[in-house]
Image (tube, grey):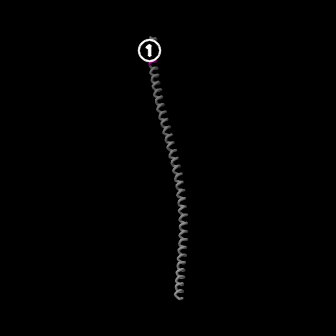
Amino acid sequence: KTNLSTALEKIQHQRQELAEQLQDATETLVARDHELKEQGAALQQVQEERNELREELRVEREQVAARIKAAEDALLEKEAQKAALEQESKDNKSKLLDALNEAEEAREQLRVASTEEAAKLALQVS
């Protein structure tokens, strides 16, 4: 009976040790599960923040592209205005030169006519 009782005590002792190991393992698993859930929540938050930043960057890129396009359009408009003003200036210079030439021709005609008139008057007087 002593051997049986000793064997029973050993079994009960081993059972107690196994129960404690099982309890420790269970606590470790519960703690690890909790850590993984926290890490998962943190990862999800990081992913959401990353997505928000990506969206902000996309919007910012669109705004910058729109500002660049507006600046390019304004530059093209200014260049077109400059070209139009340069053409108008050329046209005005050409008109001015034509008017000066006409005035010079009229002055020459007036001088010739005055000289002819003076010669006629001189012939009539003499």
Q: Tell me the residue at 52%/58% (across/down).
A: 50
Between 19 and 99, which is closer to the camera in this rendering?
A: 19
Q: Residue at label 1?
A: 119
Seen in the picture, residue 61 relative to 1 is either above or below; the reply is above
Seen in the picture, residue 23 relative to 113 is either above or below; the reply is below
Residue 63 position within the rendered picture, expressed as x and y whole percent measured from the top left? 53, 49
Between 68 and 96, which is closer to the camera in this rendering?
A: 68
Between 79 and 108, which is closer to the camera in this rendering?
A: 79
Q: Amino acid at mark 1?
A: Ala
Residue 124 position within the rendered picture, expressed as x and y whole percent measured from the top left? 46, 11
Seen in the picture, residue 48 relative to 126 is either above or below; the reply is below
Between 120 and 62, which is closer to the camera in this rendering?
A: 62
Does residue 49 belong to the magenta stretch? no
Q: Tell me the residue at 48%/39% (across/down).
A: 79
Seen in the picture, residue 112 relative to 65 is either above or below; the reply is above
Q: Tell me the residue at 48%/31% (across/down).
A: 91
Q: Which residues are magenta?
A: 112-116
Q: Tell me the residue at 44%/16% (across/down).
A: 116
- Most extreme residue toward the bottom is 2
Residue 83 position within the rendered picture, expressed as x and y whole percent measured from the top left? 48, 36
Give the overall secondary structure of the magenta segment. helix
Specify the quadrant that holds the C terminus.
top left
Tally of marks = 1
Query: Helix, strand or loop at disc 1?
Result: helix
Image-based side of 112 in relation to 25, left or right: left
Decide: few, some or many residues near mark 1? Use Cα within 10 Å; few <14, some 14-19, many ≥20.
Answer: few
Specify the quadrant that holds the N terminus.
bottom right
Residue 49 position within the rendered picture, expressed as x and y whole percent measured from the top left? 54, 59
